[in-house]
Amino acid sequence: MKVAIVASEIYPFAKTGGLADMTGALTKEIANKGIRTFAFMPLYKSVDKEKFGIKSIDKYIKVYLNNREYIFEIYKYTDHATYFFFKNDELFGRDFLYSTPEGDYPDNDIRFGAFNLAVLEFVKSENISIDIFHIHDWQTSLLAVYLKEKYPDVKSKTILTIHNLAYQGIFDKFTIERLNLGWHLFHMEALEFWDKVNFLKGGIVFSDIITTVSPTYAKEILTPEYGYGLDGVLRKYSYKLFGIINGIDYDVWNPETDEYIYHKYCWRTFEQYKPLNKKEFLKEYNLKDENKPLFIFIGRFAKQKGVDLIIENIENLASRNINLAILGSGDKGYNDFFSSIISKYPNIYIEVGYDEPLSRKMYASADFLLMPSLFEPCGLNQMIAMRYGTLVVAHKTGGLADTIIDISEPNGYGILFENLSDFINAVDRAILLYNDKERMKKLIKEVMQLDFSLEKTASSYIRLYQNLIYG
Ligand code: ADP
């Protein structure tokens, strides 16, 4: 069986969020399980070709759209899987992947349309008979559409994984012409969406199977509240929709081998070393008193992540006997707000930016991770945090509800709140828990031994691939 993971970001080559973590780990795990695996992504300016040894194979793919030709130079990297990178600097040699802080690149339809078409052209020209194209989010949804429309003889199947329904890739209707899709696709049962074109909808309609990243989110997206206008289409296709919980790469996220943290540790040694991480972190970032619980927030500054709850409660948080470290970046309004209060509170450290080494130190040093997301398709931060022995305070939604059990229940190991208005109560429950040292130790030991590895996720996907091909 030959599987192609086609994605707009794959860790460690390019990452803006959980999508890259997942596609990177999935590529690696399914290859390790003996599946012939290919991965395809654009070659962005930020991809470090030298570091990874990514080399041109001196092959060029031409695609025609937008009334002109686009040429991609193909680059390659091989480990257990074979990765192909598609280079076109006009489209992808930019400072960001999808958008600047001011907004989306206006030609994202051309950028990702051209990339999807180039992948299909390349596979055809190389005679690689792919059994399954596993595509991810709106950026690669059009691959399923092009495959059915332009390559009717190719028998490959497609699986679309929706990582976040809030991002759909919506463009004006004339993108139908720019992308040579044909006006016959511009109707309610295909790509049309309120007189515009919706890439993700195309993926939903044209893929053989749709998955999303947790069982709870798979149910939530069938409702108007979470469906972002696509709940009707998803209900229609719910027979081919599955919820498969994501996982994290246990080699990438491992406090026993993490080179960025102050002191390495595992579930056997955390009692000795996790407090030392905390001590050094507080010192480095100018926070005082290691006896106070350290809370952290790491994530995109987007409404989805519950950033407003943190802002509304910032005085409440500052007045509590805690330390708080916040790392994130995203929407300009949030960036500006957090930048404006950087040195306002002695017990709150704020960094506006994207910084993986700092995030690792935070996971290793903290007592609690805050995840007040309004909705959360899966969420990886909570899994990473628990792997590093940091307990989670989270809104009970989507993947957070699937990966955390509240301490009020038997076998519980985290703090969940159902109503957003209970956020600060949940923080207070965490402070109470923190004062029960024995219970804290027991819970930390427990969460560090839970299995959130992507290996399990990969096995579920392989079963899905097999069912699709062999029935
Ligand atoms: P998303 O919705 O952003 O994909 P996930 O929880 O699925 O959220 O994944 C977030 C990933 O991005 C995690 O690996 C997290 O550590 C990382 N991350 C998010 N924001 C930052 C940041 N500002 N700096 C470093 N890493 C970040």
Image (cartoon, grey):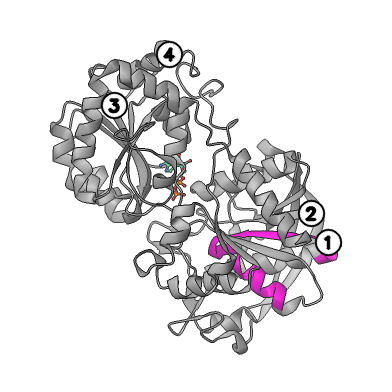
- For badge 4, the amino acid type reads Tyr
Q: How far is disc 3 from disc 2 in space, using C-alphas?
A: 46 Å
Mark 1 vs 4: CB contact within 8 A:
no
**In-image side of 82 versus 256 (left or right):** right
Number of other residues with Cα within 10 Å of mark 1, as a class: few under 14, some 14 to 19, many 20 or more? some
What mark, if any, has residue 273 been given in the picture? 4
* Residue identifier under label 2: 2
Placement of 271 over or under 142, stated as above or below = above
Magenta segment boundaries in residue numbering:
124-148
Q: Residue at x 17, y 43 (%)?
A: 313
Q: How far is disc 2 from disc 1 in space, using C-alphas?
A: 7 Å
**In-image side of 408 versus 269 (left or right):** left
Residue 424 falls in image quadrant: top left
Q: Earlier in the sequence, mark 1 or mark 3?
A: 1
Q: Earlier in the sequence, mark 2 or mark 1?
A: 2
Any atom of ligand 1 within 8 Å of the CB at mark 3?
Answer: no
Residue 101 location in percent, x, y? Answer: 39, 56
Q: How far is disc 2 from disc 4 in space, using C-alphas?
A: 44 Å
Classify mark 3: helix, strand or loop: strand
Placement of 78 over or under 201, stated as above or below = above
